[in-house]
Image (tube, rainbow, N blue to C red):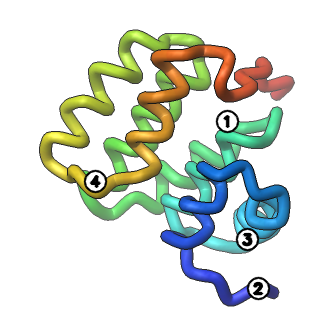
Amino acid sequence: MDSTSTDQLVRRLIAEDATAIGVLVERAGTTDDPAVLTAAALVVPAWRPLLARAAAAAGTSRDRQLVVIATAYLSGDAPRAVLLARDHLAEYPASLLAAYIAAAAAEPETLDTEQDPS
């Protein structure tokens, strides 16, 4: 499996790198890294189980906040996702994943928010 760091994969996700997206989805099958699970949830139709695993694995407030931001966004509550991301970014200004979700929430067609079939 690819040894690329999670931070690098998130950067490449933001750049819409198909290879990085594939690696994120593959890693999501076996990891308990909340950032990987949250990032992968943004690109798969069945996102709820990934975010449930991310929430269970989240050991820090930063990780828990990311899961809540992604859940709000993917559930269709873009305004709430933006507000939560704003607060998160005030505390963690280097959080690229939160910034990415906030940008997508501000412009809803940026990410595909298909309904989770589960």
**Quadrant of the snapshot with the C terminus:** top right
Q: Amino acid at mark 3?
A: Arg
Position of residue 56 relative to residue 26, above or below, is above
CB of mark 4 within 8 Å of CB of mark 2?
no
What residue is shown with label 1? Answer: 48
- For image coordinates 21% across by 52% down, the residue present is 92
Badge 3 marks a residue whose secondary structure is helix
Question: Between residues 69 and 54, which one lies in front from this camera angle?
Answer: 69
Badge 2 marks a residue whose secondary structure is loop
- Percent from the top left, x then y, of residue 21? 76, 58
Q: Amino acid at mark 2?
A: Asp
- Categorize mark 1 by other alpha carbons within 10 Å: few (<14), some (14-19), many (20+): some
What residue is shown with label 3? Answer: 27
Q: Disc 4 and disc 1: Cα gap in Å?
A: 19 Å
- Percent from the top left, x then y, of residue 1? 81, 87
- For image coordinates 40% across by 42% down, the residue present is 98
What residue is shown with label 4? Answer: 62
